[in-house]
Amino acid sequence: MEKPSLTKFALALMAALALSACGHSCHHSSSSSGTDDANQEQPGGGGDEQPGDDSGNGDSGTTSSGVNFTCEKGMDSSDNLFASYAGDYGDSGTDPNAPEYAHTVTLDLDSMTFKVDGGAGTVLAEDEGAEIMEGVIAAMDDDLLVIDLSEAEGSIQFSLSGTGTRAIDITAAQNAAVGLELNGVSITSGNYPAIAVGPNTATVYVTLKGDNYLADSREFGTGYSEANGTDYYDTNALAADIDEDTEETQQWALGSDANGVLSTNGIMRIAGEGSLNVETGYKHGIYAKNRIYMLGGKVGVYNEGRNGIQSKNGFDMSGGTVLLCGVGTNTNKQSRGIIVSGDESEDGAGLGGITITDGVIGIKTVSKAISAKWDIEDDAETADTGDDPSPVVTISGGTISIETTGKVIDSDGNGAKITYYDEDGLAVTEEEKLTPEGIEGKLGVLISGGKITVSTTDDALNASRDGDGYITIKDGNESPYVVLESSSADAIDSNGDINIEGGVVVAVSSLGSEDGFDCDGTLNITGGLAIGISGSSMTYATENGSTQNTFVIGSAYGGKPGTTMAVTNSAGKAVFAYEIPDSISSYGIMTLTSPELVAGDTYSVMSGVTLTGGSATGGLYYDLPTTVTGGSETGTIEVTANTHLYSLGAQGGGNPGDGGNPPDSQGGGDGGTPPDGQGPGGDGGNPPGDF
């Protein structure tokens, strides 16, 4: 059913105030809102093209320190997400696609004074309306400030400053470009979005100056509408007041169920040099029904509701800094980070993805951190695939740090159901589930640059489309540095292929049944420097999928957690080195690859060594150490031109390739023993000769 919108309230307010200032026919376009499952509009409206990639190459050798901010709930300079942030900031600047504005209207919320192009001020009184300039009218009551510029000539920019408690609703003309400059503004808006811009074909250009704060007071599990019995009702509603098709909520309140504290039903583009902190406990912090572009500025969202940032057709980031903290623990609706839902329609076909070319992102959430979530198995409503979205996450630059904390709850299809209340207080009966994945593209994840650190309870990288899903890591304009660790799932999980073609990749999963690399298709290793730590002893690497030499080594030969292992060539020089993390208690196998592992040499696997020199990220040395001392040789592997896959003390599925040899003191052939004091770790670690 059609949900009420903030503009619906705005129109009622305009009509109630009987604005004599109109002097002409005032046409309003009702902007749809409510849940993100409403009908989708076309992406048009100007500025829909993606900004060019002007990402620069930073020092890729820097080891990330992870998510380095504290989830602070606050609306002042000393108490917000940026107050404790200790990291770098992304580049900021102007939006190259912003229009030339015909007029700039400033609004000081402290005095409710409008000024046009710096001229004389118009003071707006409560329960009155006024014409601010030709084609722009405004009216307000206790809760709402309504601005209608649907009859204005040219593009208008609004510059907001001061402190207020009224929600601001701006209605523009179809296909309009609307400027929204936040210049030291603080709004706590009650039961409405702090700022909403419509209609669905408009593009809003948000420019950040100074420090800005937006919050609402809406609560999760509440049905907000203009009357108890309109759109929602609870047990206090009179039967005569309940409209047809109205839904019962656990509690009703006067207000709007529109998505987002900062919200548009069109396109949103964010730029500037300032900051914006957003708080909500209801649905989403920042919402665009079409698409969001992040080009500059600093944006922080503290969310006790559903999503920090959400759109339908896409999220594109080429600059700026985004910090998201999602702490909501509502059943089956735990807080998430950046979500693009996708839209199965002619207008949404091929869209629905996430693209990051530069900038800085830090995310701490209970549930998913980044997800292009349209699922062909769950969300498709027609058999026609020509109108399907393309839910792919593409990263070619920037710095991304992610941490998810929720306990994984698998929806196993056993028929057990629970009943809970959703954002609007509606009772829902379904299986309980929680999937706190790091970066998810339902169709695919493509990484060709950037510095990425992900620590999760569920899969760190995930592509879940059966058969077609893919995860590819390769070199682009820069080499990506990807460090992944999952405490209770796979580090990289694809329902199709995994393609390691370049970059530096660390993928750690120590749980006994989970893996560093897990795919239903083929693990293709054709380049790059990579290591995967698996709790299981399942070998996904295959001879058919590898053109770069790859070693699969059991834990008894790689060494214990908290120690350093190395692979040296016949001259004693390190060609691979890795500090096994002490965050894991055991593991089964490690799968490692490097272009330094060349045919025609015999390599020694060394455990418990001490290294001198070199540089590492996530424990993996991309700049090799100059010397390797101490430790012990646990086995050797002779690399030939006949195969690219070699195993030492590993067993499990896949093609184990050619076996390695234990040191002379351990014997060979049928048995042998693991190195003293190490023993098999996890489910693997079998001595040579057992596979």
Image: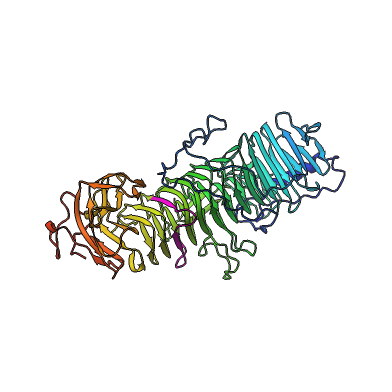
Q: Position of residue 38 (x, y in %)?
A: 63, 56
Does 314 sit above or below residue 111?
below
Does 514 sit above or below residue 642?
above
Count every numbered label the image shows and give the total.
Answer: 0
26 vs 150, nearest the viewer: 150
Question: Over which residues does the magenta segment extend?
Answer: 464-484
Q: Residue, x 19% and y 62% (percent of image)?
A: 661
Which quadrant, please, contains the C terminus? bottom left
Residue 192 visible: no
Q: Residue, x 57% and y 62% (percent of image)?
A: 389
Q: Position of residue 597 (x, y in %)?
A: 30, 60
Question: Quarter of the image holding residue 206?
Answer: top right
Q: Position of residue 181 (x, y in %)?
A: 68, 39
Q: Image check: 321 left or right of 555?
A: right
Answer whether residue 35 is magenta in the image.
no
Which quadrant, please, contains the N terminus? bottom right
- Describe the colour scheme in one phrase: rainbow
Q: Residue, x 23% and y 55% (percent of image)?
A: 571
Q: Residue furthest right?
A: 23
**Magenta stretch, overall SS:** loop
Does 158 sit above or below residue 661?
above
Q: Position of residue 288 (x, y in %)?
A: 62, 50
Q: Residue, x 75% and y 39% (percent of image)?
A: 104
Answer whether residue 483 is magenta in the image.
yes
Does 609 sit above or below residue 382?
above
Q: Image check: 35 left or right of 558?
A: right
Residue 173 visible: yes
